[in-house]
Image: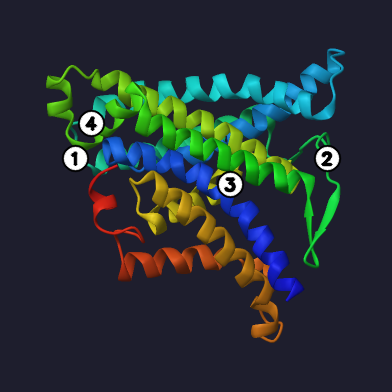
Amino acid sequence: MDIFIQQLINGLVVGSIYALIALGYTMVYGILQLINFAHGEIVMMGAMITISAIQVLTASGVALPGPLMVIAGLLIAIPITMLLGFLIERIAYRPLRKAPRLAPLITAIGISIVLQQLAVLIWKNNPRSFPDLLPHEAHNFMGAIITDLQIVIVVLAILIMAGLLVMVEKTKLGRAMRAVSMNQAVASLMGVNINYVISMTFVIGSGLGAIAGVMVGANYGLAYPTMGFMIGLKAFTAAVLGGIGNLAGAVAGGILLGVIESVGAGYLGPLTGGVLGSHYQDIFAFMVLILVLVFRPSGLLGERVAERA
């Protein structure tokens, strides 16, 4: 029972991060029906820039408490990733809006590779340790262990996701996003600036990606230039699981995928007699993706989410 609760907690933490990244995929898909495979690399950039910023601040003699130092690094990384998201949309995707859907899809894969190789050029191919600046005090919860960092990740992710949902439902920009996702031509006739709304979608999604990247780096204690591929693929699976194009679906899919992966990894060894260990946990994400695509391509939240954001 203790193992199950521990894996449940681990799954909730990882699932919160998946959900945050999945929002970036689902926002873009809801607006453009485009799968932005470069979003995983935006997450990686957020983590790597934050680590570099913290190192520069430390070398410059800036003395701040650990959590404030991480926040300072993140505040440097967020505008940079937002600018990156804006430029990607403006340069790579906007000229292809009326092209066949395969063209922007291939472009997204190309942008992903370009960003990954750019990161290798800047930071080399070696993993970077995430500075140990955040509290790690462990707490006992029903026989399982949860740390301060894990609590912060879950609470922060929930607050950000709730804030995004409120923004989409209650603000002028959110209403414009929903209008563009339903019908761009009609939204344009109603006075909505289509280009602005699409750019802001990429900018906001990239900002969320930077925060998620820091969460990944802090949770696992390191970051590296190729980390965006797998974390991005899992977040995409989470978006598909929940119903890509739907924000609530991305949140539900992310948390559910994290729990499935962690609980599955916890029991994989005993169930296979030790043949497969917990390091094979990635297979669960791909199994989920295959099952969803075969039996419910529209995701858990139904057909409506596949049609509209």
Residue 14 against residue 176 in the figure, above or below: below
Q: Residue at x 64, y 19 (%)?
A: 76
- Asked if the residue at tag 4 contacts the one at tag 3, i.e. Cβ–Cβ closer than 8 Å, the answer is no
Q: Residue at x 87, y 13 (%)?
A: 61
Q: CA distance from mark 1 to mark 4?
A: 23 Å
* Side (left or right) of 108 relative to 51: left
Q: CA distance from mark 1 to mark 2?
A: 49 Å
- Precedes in sequence: disc 1 or disc 4: 1
Disc 4 target residue = 179
Badge 3 density bin: few <14, some 14–19, many ≥20, Cα 10 Å: many
Q: Secondary structure at mark 2?
A: loop
Disc 1 target residue = 100
Badge 1 density bin: few <14, some 14–19, many ≥20, Cα 10 Å: few
Residue 276 against residue 176 in the figure, above or below: below
Residue 126 against residue 5 in the figure, above or below: above
Viewer-nearest residue: 95 or 240: 240
- Precedes in sequence: disc 1 or disc 2: 1
Answer whether residue 99 is visible to the viewer in this image.
yes
Disc 2 target residue = 135
Quarter of image, res 293: bottom left
- Precedes in sequence: disc 3 or disc 4: 3
Q: CA distance from mark 3 to mark 2?
A: 18 Å
Q: CA distance from mark 2 to mark 4?
A: 43 Å
Answer whether residue 216 is visible to the viewer in this image.
no
